[in-house]
Amino acid sequence: MEHESDLDWFCISEQKLICSHCAIVGSCQGHTVTPLASRVTAVRNQLVDICEKMQLQAKRIELFINQTLTAKERALQVEASGAREQVVAQVSVVREAVEEEEQRLLEAVQREEERVEQCLLTQRAHWGQALAMLTQTRTRLVHTLTNTPDIQLATSGQEIAERIEEAEGVGEPCDTDHLNLNTSCSDSKLMRGLWASAILLGPTAYGSANLTFDERTVSSVLSLSEDLCTLTFLPKRSRQSPPYDPARFDSWPNALGTLAISSGTHSWVIDVGESGAFKVGVCYSSMGRKGSGNDSRLGYNVQSWVLSKYDGDFSFCHAGKNTPLHVVHKPKSLGLLLDWPSQTLVFYDPDSRAVLHSVRHAFSGPLMPAFAVADRSVTILH
C-alpha cells in the first residue's frame, strides 16, 4: 500500500505506522491514532518504567539473597541445633524417668517375689512339721489299735484323747492371697500413660473400624440410627416395644457393640457430644440383660467396667463401686484402649491423648464394648 505522505502517525488500533491521509480519510479513519513522536515517547517511557521496575525487583532479589537467605541459613543452623537439643533433652527426661520407674518397679517386683517366696518357705516348713507330727500321731494310734490288748485298750482313753488333741491342733491348710504375687506391685501410672501414648500415637495405630452397635442388644428406651453407629435416648412418648430378644436390655438404657475381644489390642472412640448422662466401657457377654437389678446395670456388677458421666461428674464404675475422676477438660469424645495381652483397659481423651483412668484385671472371658445413654445421644466414630 502506497502512502501519500510521510509515515509520521501511529494507528493504535492496528498497531502500525500510517500517514496523515490514512488517519483522516484512509483505511484507519475512525481508529485511535497518535503522532509518531508521541508514540515513541510513550514507548520510551514504558521501557523506562519497566527497566526501573526490573531494577527495583533485581535489588529486592539481591537483598533477599544476600540478607534474608543468608540470615535464614544462619538461623537454620541455630534453630536446628536448638530443636535437636530439645529432642535430646525431652528424650533424656523421658528416658531417665522411665529408667528410674523401671528400676523402682523391678525392685518392687523383686521384693514382692521375695515376700511370697518367704511365705511359701514358712508355709512349707510349718506344714511339713505338721504333716510329720500328724503322721507320727496316726502311726501311734494305729499301733495302739492293732497291738494293744483289749483290757489295756479299754483303759487307754486318756492317751488316745491326747493323741487326738494333738491331731486336731494341726488344723487345716488354707490357700490365701498372701501366698500369691500381688500384681499391683508392677502397676505404674507413669508407665501406663507412656504405654498408652506409644500405642495411640505410634506408627501402628490400633482401631476398630468395623465396630457398630448390636441392634439385638439395644434397649427399648433407645433408638438406633440406620448406620448402627448412633444411640439416642427416647422420651417416653416416642418409645416402642421391640420384639423380644434374649440379648436385649429391657430396662436399663444399655447397648453392646458387635465386637467380642479376647486377643490383641483394640481401641475405639465415642462421640458423647453434649450428653449429660452416659457410660462407656466393656462387659462380659454373659452380663444380665433383663430386669432393673444390678445384674444388668453397667458398672454395678462384677461383669462390667465403665467410665460414667452423670450430673457433670465423671467416675469409674465396677462392681457397684464408683471412683470419682478429676477431669479438667470436659471431652466431647472418649476413647477406649483394650490390650488383651496385658489385661489392661484404658479410658483416654482422644484430643489430648491424656489417660483419664486405667485398670488391670484378669479378664476371664471375651469382652464386649458396652454403652449406656440417658441424655441425648452418643456415636461411634470411625
Image (cartoon, helix red, strand yellow):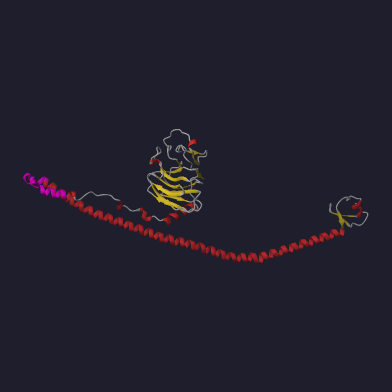
Q: Is residue 150 left or right of residue 32?
A: left
| Residue at 49 percent of width and 63 percent of height | 89
Q: Main secondary structure of the magenta part?
A: helix
Quadrant hosting residue 217? top left
Is residue 151 one of those drawn in magenta? yes
From the top left corner, tell me how far across and down residue 30 is, in percent: 88, 50
Residue under the point 10% across and 49% down: 158
Between residues 202 and 281, which one lies in front from this camera angle?
A: 281
Can residue 286 be seen by looking at this rendering?
no
First to last magenta residue range: 145-165
Q: Residue furthest top?
A: 243
In the rendered image, residue 106, in percent from the top left (x then y), is placed at 37, 58
Q: Nearer the viewer, residue 316 or 129?
A: 316
What x and y, as percent, mark residue 357?
43, 51
Which residue, as the protein is rendered here, is positioned at the far left?
Answer: 151
Q: Nearer the viewer, residue 87 or 361?
A: 361
Please say if 56 is above or below 133.
below
Residue that appears at 76% across and 62% down: 51
The question of residue 361 being in magenta is answered with no
**Residue 106 visible in the picture:** yes
Residue 306 locus on image (x, y percent): 42, 46
